[in-house]
Amino acid sequence: MFEEKGEKRNMSKIGVFDSGFGGLSILKEIVKKMPQYSYVYLGDSARAPYGSRSHDAILEFTKQGIDFLFSKGAEIIVLACNSASSQALRYIQQVYLPETYPEKKVLGVIIPTAEVAITKSKNMCIGVLATEATVSAGAFKRELKKLDSTVDVYEIPAPLLVPLIEAGKEDSLKIKRLVKDYVALVSKQPIDTLILGCTHYGIIKEDFISVAEGVTVISEAEIVADKLFTYIEKHADIKSKLSLDADVCFFTTDTTNKFESIGSRFFGSTIISHEINL
Ligand code: DGL
């Protein structure tokens, strides 16, 4: 904080962390909802995808990511990555933050999404498509069951979609076939609600809707933006520290060229990034 013409200026930012590009689609909705704030985004693209990595690797990388974002002035961080949220968030909230950053907050994407999904399901039978790391953590099932212990949850890994979406093949026949196959697999159970539990799948939400007949398809970006808005409104201590400079700063662990060309598609407009080492 510094003083300017006798006025206190707030300097804190909202941090958003992802394994790479997918979190940019979440950031896009967050910025749309709250354009007045300052954001700092880190995509660990050099080590993505996280979805096929071990718990220990995801936890270690996520800790490094949040250390970096706090060092850049984040007051609150959203783990936009489902794999990081499901494998690392609990430890970070329960152990790492209290020990290392007792004043700061880290939120994930699983709980907000589960809270909306549970209100949409009528038969309490919910499907989840996500990365292998997210499915193996069972985080969606755990959070949904906390909200309603009678819910049945079917989680299926859908790992083949991420590389195709990053390669810009959203309109390819291959993607459409995979979506159909994954939906058929999860629909072996009588689900009436399907959570797209991976940052990338929201980009092709319409493909899921077109094949998942009679099923409510839930993607995360708007949900996370709405829940973050509500959270900040309820936490005056955080809100009062946030800078109102309306800017976004992007960092990547990979080359900036690659991050900017793929990332701009996810963010929906041109981005300028800085390369860092974690
Ligand atoms: N961001 C990841 C997620 O939502 C998808 C990409 C990856 O596996 O790193 O789980």
Image (cartoon, helix red, strand yellow):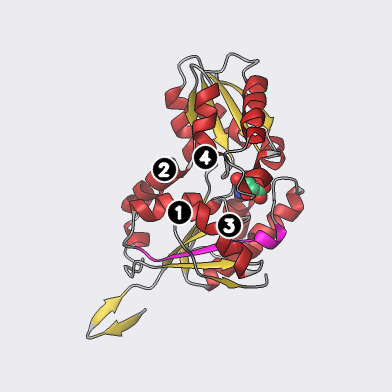
Residue carrying label 2: 222
Question: Can I make out residue 220 in this image?
Answer: yes
Look at the picture and state if 177 lies above or below 151.
below
Q: CA distance from mark 3 to mark 2?
A: 21 Å
Return the x and y of residue 42 as percentages of the image width and height.
56, 63
Residue carrying label 1: 268
Q: CA distance from mark 1 to mark 3?
A: 10 Å
10 Å neighbourhood of mark 1: few (<14), some, or many (≥20)?
A: few
Q: Which mark is residue 262?
A: 3
Secondary structure of residue under mark 3: helix
The residue drawn where x is 64% and y is 20% is 184
Q: Quadrant of residue 150?
A: top right
Return the x and y of residue 79 as percentages of the image width and height.
55, 52
Residue carrying label 4: 202
10 Å neighbourhood of mark 3: few (<14), some, or many (≥20)?
A: some
Q: Nearer the viewer, mark 2 or mark 1?
A: 1
Tell me which label, 2 or 1, sits earlier in the chain: 2
Q: CA distance from mark 4 to mark 3?
A: 16 Å
Residue type at the position of mark 2: Glu
